Image: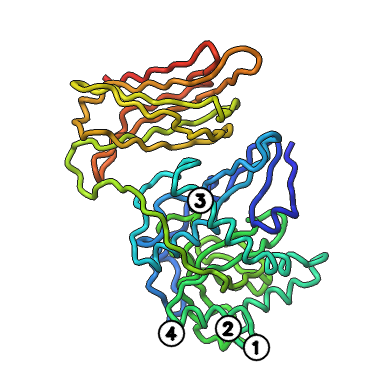
């Protein structure tokens, strides 16, 4: 049974679930229609910033699940606002976005920075979320829809144009359309095109295009357009992605993003790091004193161990965490012999149990990746106080 916490969901744009496995928009990713199918009106009213989702956006999608209340298995879905704020931070700092294609694990520098920026994106706009959330029995549907079309008198479109015309990408908060579609969401506006529309709530409203980076869709520029029949806004490329209205987040202020170690950009066949994906099944990893160690066995050199790869944090059930382990020295792929997983669980009634349902091991040689191991089970391994070791043989 799912229990929804609507008040918190209203403020955060996230879905809260108790004792159930929630899914984000990104995990139900469908095929987009090719962008060339659409021919938006492109007159001299079009304006674009320098932000390009294919260059400045993350290489992984917003498929986060967050451990909100561990004792009750209450979790939140997504860190859209944090990803938007973080990409803007890198953009304004003139630094390249991290090139990793995997979602960062909890307690890593990138994950914690994105989470922190998510909190900021909410805190700074609580009043706006409250405003667009107050709509008893749909009485304000037309009002909210028109807010997004008003190009004068402090309307949302006027605010949007002011930012874009100054060359600044600006975050948008998207208010959910109804209880069945996408929940509240945050995206980054990177341009617009009025077409023949004058911003006066008159003719040609359908010409309006707002170009956005959506962290649920990697590397793509999506187009938010008005739907006068439904009095809502949807993606031109995905008409099932519908929101009642939007607000312009002018409260964003840039921060200096963290310095992160990156893999080299060239592929030379020499391995510099391993990525290990742990998919937890129905029994979670507790964390605290119950943690996971990884040992890598290399031909011709001493084993390399990384202790407490979960960094004392809980790994929630039915979810994947990806850990990157840089090697002490670069090696040939054939010299990686095996990887051993050890837990620090105590036995007895108070000891932890952990279901590992899938494990993948990927070797990085600069720009290229090579899968070395992929095993699945139900579970693949159940770790207990008595069973603490799993060995993945690669050779």
Q: Residue at x 51, y 69 (%)?
A: 253
Residue on which disc 4 sits: 43
- Answer left or right for 203 relative to 342: right
Residue 383 in the image, given as x and y percentages of width and height: 52, 18
Question: Can you say whether 26 is above or below 251 in the image?
Answer: above
- Whether residue 191 is visible: yes
Q: Secondary structure at mark 2?
A: helix
Q: Secondary structure at mark 1?
A: loop
Crowd rating for badge 3 (residues with CA inside 10 Å; few <14, some 14–19, many 20+): many
Occupied quadrant, residue 374: top left
Q: Which mark is residue 121?
A: none
Crowd rating for badge 1 (residues with CA inside 10 Å; few <14, some 14–19, many 20+): few
Crowd rating for badge 2 (residues with CA inside 10 Å; few <14, some 14–19, many 20+): some
Q: Residue at x 66, y 64 (%)?
A: 175
Residue on which disc 2 sits: 158
Instruction: State which tag comes first along the sequence, 1 or 3.
Output: 3
Question: Can you say whether 346 is above or below 82 in the image?
Answer: above
Q: Secondary structure at mark 3?
A: loop
Residue on which disc 1 sits: 153
- Answer left or right for 205 relative to 295: right
Residue 58 in the image, given as x and y percentages of width and height: 41, 55
Crowd rating for badge 4 (residues with CA inside 10 Å; few <14, some 14–19, many 20+): few
């Amino acid at each position: 049974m799912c229990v929804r916490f609507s008040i918190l969901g209203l403020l955060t744009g996230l879905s809260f679930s108790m004792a159930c496995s929630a899914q984000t928009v990104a995990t139900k990713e469908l095929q987009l229609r090719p962008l060339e199918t659409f021919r938006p009106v492109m007159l001299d009213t079009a304006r674009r910033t320098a932000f390009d989702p294919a260059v400045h956006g993350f290489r992984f999608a917003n498929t986060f699940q967050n451990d909100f209340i561990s004792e009750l298995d209450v979790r939140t879905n997504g860190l859209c606002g944090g990803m938007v704020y973080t990409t803007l931070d890198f953009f304004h700092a003139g630094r390249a976005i991290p090139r990793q294609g995997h979602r960062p694990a909890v307690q890593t520098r990138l994950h914690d920075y994105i989470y922190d920026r998510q909190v900021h994106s909410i805190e700074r706009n609580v009043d706006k979320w409250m405003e667009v959330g107050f709509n008893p029995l749909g009485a304000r549907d037309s009002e909210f829809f028109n807010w997004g079309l008003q190009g004068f008198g402090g309307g949302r479109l006027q605010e949007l144009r002011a930012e874009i015309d100054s060359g600044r990408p600006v975050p948008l908060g998207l208010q959910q359309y109804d209880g069945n579609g996408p929940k509240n969401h945050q995206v980054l506006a990177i341009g617009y095109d009025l077409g023949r529309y004058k911003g006066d709530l008159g003719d040609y409203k359908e010409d309006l295009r707002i170009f956005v980076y959506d962290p649920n869709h990697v590397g793509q520029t999506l187009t938010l357009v008005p739907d006068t029949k439904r009095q809502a806004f949807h993606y031109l490329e995905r008409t099932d992605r519908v929101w009642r209205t939007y607000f312009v987040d002018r409260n964003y202020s840039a921060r200096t993003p963290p310095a992160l170690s990156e893999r080299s950009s060239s592929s030379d066949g020499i391995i510099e790091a391993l990525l290990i994906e742990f998919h937890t099944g129905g029994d979670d990893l507790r964390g605290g004193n119950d943690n996971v160690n990884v040992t890598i066995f290399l031909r011709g050199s001493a084993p390399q161990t990384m202790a407490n790869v979960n960094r004392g944090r809980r790994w929630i059930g039915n979810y994947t965490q990806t850990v990157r382990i840089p090697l002490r020295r670069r090696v040939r792929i054939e010299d990686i012999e095996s990887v051993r997983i050890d837990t620090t669980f105590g036995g007895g009634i108070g000891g932890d149990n952990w279901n590992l349902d899938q494990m993948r091991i990927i070797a990085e040689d600069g720009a290229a990746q090579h899968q070395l191991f992929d095993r699945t089970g139900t579970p693949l391994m159940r770790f207990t106080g008595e069973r603490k070791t799993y060995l993945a043989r690669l050779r």
